[in-house]
Every structure is written in structure tokens, then in C-alpha cells.
Amino acid sequence: MASAAAAQDHPMSFFITSVNPGNGADLGGIEGADAHCTALAEAAGSTGQTWAAYLSTSTENARDRIGTGPWYNAKGEEVAASVEDLHSEENNLSKTASIDETGAIINGRGDSPNRHDILTGSDGRGMLVGDACMDWTSTAADGSAMVGHHDRTGGGDNPTSWNAAHGSRGCSLENLQSTGGDGLFYCFATN
């Protein structure tokens, strides 16, 4: 267990959003997603950092948006030392380490409701897959975005992948919820 001193030694630099901004995969584009990360972090008392959503777009891959690491959760636990570590089996991402900005565990497979599908639009290396719900501006039922499983379990082509488990059923909040998501996404401090 991380102590309060450890959390102070390592300020939060990684979290899963506790809530969707309100419109499914239409996050207001990448700028809206970054602003949501910043607002949640600041509301949780984390100031003085630049936050970026781990989301790929047609102009930028998620892995290139998030800085160089290391990254720590709200409990001061290191989740990854570097971009390469993050995209390897060496990361420390799990249901208990991939927590929200307040330190709360996000419901996973077996919990009700299941919220383990985390939006990324990325493949396992953090590169764009598909159109990511039109670069995070669409709620279309016929759209899709790649999601990962924060609890590293479930179905899909890569059920244990934190960032590339399967495509979403659509881009609306209802579509995302129907397959075990809630329109949540990962946030990383870039500095």
C-alpha cells in the first residue's frame, strides 16, 4: 500500500476519468477531452500540470500526446516508467492501479454496472485505429472507437489489453454502455 508520504513524493500524473463529459464519444474533439482531464484533475486538487487525454486522432497518436513518464496514480503508485514501459507487459495497469482522479476504483467486469471499456482509439502500441468516432466528435450509432479494458479482463480480440481490447458498438453513450463502458478515458500529465 502506498503511504501518504509516497503520494506526496509522487503527485498524481495518471487517472481514468470518473465521468464522461456527457455526450458519449463526442468529447468536443481532442481539445474537449484534454480540457475534461484538466478540469477533473484540478477538482481533485492536482494543479500546475498539463493534462492530455490518451486518445488517438487522425493527426496524432495517443502515445505521442502524453509526455515521457513516469506516471503515478492518485495513490502515488507508479503505473509506468516511460512510454515504452506503458506499451509493454511491464506496466502496472490493473483494476486496482487504474483508478480515477479521486483514487476510486472504476467498476470492471463482474461489477454492476460494468464500466471497464475505456476509450482510446488506439492499437496496442498507442497508434490510431479506425476513425475514433470522427476524431471524438461523433455520437453516431454506426461509428466506432477502439476501447481497452482497464481491469485487463473480458471479451474481444485482445481481452487483457488496457488500450486495444475491441471496437465499441457505436459512439453514443448508450452504445458505449451497452458493451460495458461509460465513455471514460485515460488522462496523463505531460510534464
Image: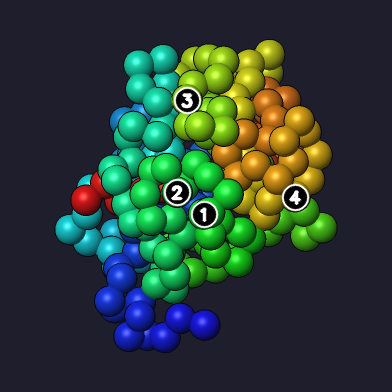
| Mark 2 or mark 3, earlier in chain | 2
- The Cα–Cα distance between marks 2 and 4, rounded to whole angstroms, is 20 Å
Q: Amino acid at mark 4?
A: Thr
Q: How is the image coloured?
A: rainbow
Residue at numbered disc 3: 127
Q: Residue 179, image x and y in percent?
A: 76, 37
- The Cα–Cα distance between marks 1 and 3, rounded to whole angstroms, is 17 Å
Circles 2 and 1 in contact, beta carbons < 8 Å? yes
Foreground mark, 2 or 4, reads 2
Circles 2 and 3 in contact, beta carbons < 8 Å? no
Q: Amino acid at mark 3?
A: Met
Residue at numbered disc 4: 153
With respect to residue 20, does 132 lie above or below?
above
- Front residue of this view, candidates 80 and 98: 80
Circles 2 and 4 in contact, beta carbons < 8 Å? no
Q: Is residue 145 visible?
A: yes
Q: Amino acid at mark 1?
A: Asn
Residue at numbered disc 2: 85
| Mark 2 or mark 4, earlier in chain | 2
* Mark 3 residue crowding within 10 angstroms, few (<14) / some (14–19) / many (20+): many
Q: Residue 84, image x and y in percent?
A: 42, 43
Instruction: Give the secondary structure at mark 1.
Output: loop
With respect to residue 102, does 18 lie above or below?
above
Kindly identify the residue that appears in the image at 78 percent across and 60 percent down.
111
